[in-house]
Amino acid sequence: METLHVDQLISYASDADKKEWETLRLDYAHERGSLKLRQSIASHYPNVTEEQILVFAGAQEAIFCAMNATITSKSRCGVVTPAYEALFEIPKALGAQIVPIPLKPQSNGWFLDIDDLKRAHVEKPFTNLILNFPHNPTGTLLSLELFEEIVNLSLINDSWIVNDEVFRGLEHNPAKRLPPIASLTPRGISIGSISKPHGLGGLRIGWLACQSPELLERALFYKQSLSVCSSSIDDWLASLVIEHSSILRRNATLIALENLEFIDKHFAQPHTKFEWNAPSAGCVAFPALRKDISVTHLANSLLSKHNIMIIPGECFSQSATNRFRLGYGQKNFKEVFNTFCNFLDMDYP
Ligand SMILES: Cc1ncc(COP(=O)(O)O)c(C=O)c1O
């Protein structure tokens, strides 16, 4: 997402907030996150209180602690693939059995075949389901009906169900926004972040929301050996961000939608080099190149020649793929995309 500057963010602060900011004591922040921050996060989660929110140094730390708190070498984890690396690699490193639940490309996007999931669950129930909707890298958003069906499957044997929701709030049609998983079931763990939806990756604040006190204590135990607490500067600024989250997410979504319109026009051309499976949320998509070439090699060459980064499919637990992740959340996207297409014409005719 387009990154914000400190002065842009501070311009949202009231006079009282600005005074508080200037005199902020640089002490350790509370290990669970400040009360103010947890209260503002909890206000976005029906059925969840501030005691059920735990703040971390980024969603990445929240994922690590949530996984360590719920997964052992005896676990059987159903993981939606392609997958953001941590969601696949951490359970694998903990020795769990990993069963991919593939998203499948179709002409107007991607779909999850619920029968695949049911079959695997009936064969031997999952102890953990690891979801990520809105999804990175495909930009897929499930329908509420399908999402609830998956939650109901998890209830059969009380499996833990994590949903990485860091792209929540960037739905292209806000009416399609899913409820947080932590609001739907006591074994649901929602992962959230300041960075992704607001273009604020430099504020290292993420969180998990869960109704289970045992899970919260176990996750905190792991955090105590990692960051211990977040930076008090980040904690303070994150409260300001959450207070103005709706407008910040709306602005970010408008940039993404304008870029998407541009991409749609390009991919509608008959000579396009890409297979396009349109995203419905977030600022990333996972197109394929209609050429039998190494996307990893291409990505390295694009980076060194033009300083443009695409992420090859193999980084998303997809071996041998001609897919890559395309980010379209930045204001200079059109210019960069044209450079990318010219590079393809010249170097990969
Ligand atoms: C799906 C997903 N989850 C979690 C993260 C980590 O987010 P954070 O920057 O808050 O650590 C990312 C970052 O790229 C992500 O794409």
Image (spheres, rainbow, N blue to C red):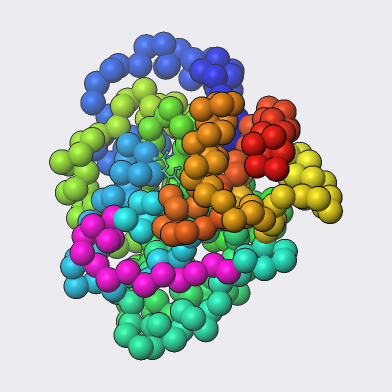
Give x and y (percent) for residue 67.
Answer: 28, 57
Taking 41 as reference, is 224 left or right?
left
The answer to which image quadrant residue 57 occupies is top left
Q: Is residue 136 above or below residue 32?
A: below
Residue 180: say if magenta.
no
Which image quadrant shows ligand 1?
top left
Taking depth in this image into account, of 188 and 113 the one nearest to the observer is 113
The stretch in magenta equals 90-104
Give x and y (percent) for residue 174.
Answer: 68, 53
Report whether residue 252 is seen.
no
Taking 58 as reference, is 331 left or right?
right
Give x and y (percent) for residue 265.
Answer: 82, 46
- Residue at image coords 39%, 76%: 154
Taking 310 as reference, is 173 left or right?
right
Q: Is residue 5 above or below residue 319?
A: above
Q: Is residue 5 above or below residue 330?
A: above
Taking depth in this image into account, of 180 and 291 the one nearest to the observer is 291
Report whether residue 25 is seen.
yes
Give x and y (percent) for residue 53.
Answer: 35, 49
- Residue at image coords 36%, 72%: 99
- Residue at image coords 54%, 67%: 103
- Residue at image coords 72%, 28%: 335
Taking depth in this image into account, of 84 and 345 the one nearest to the observer is 345
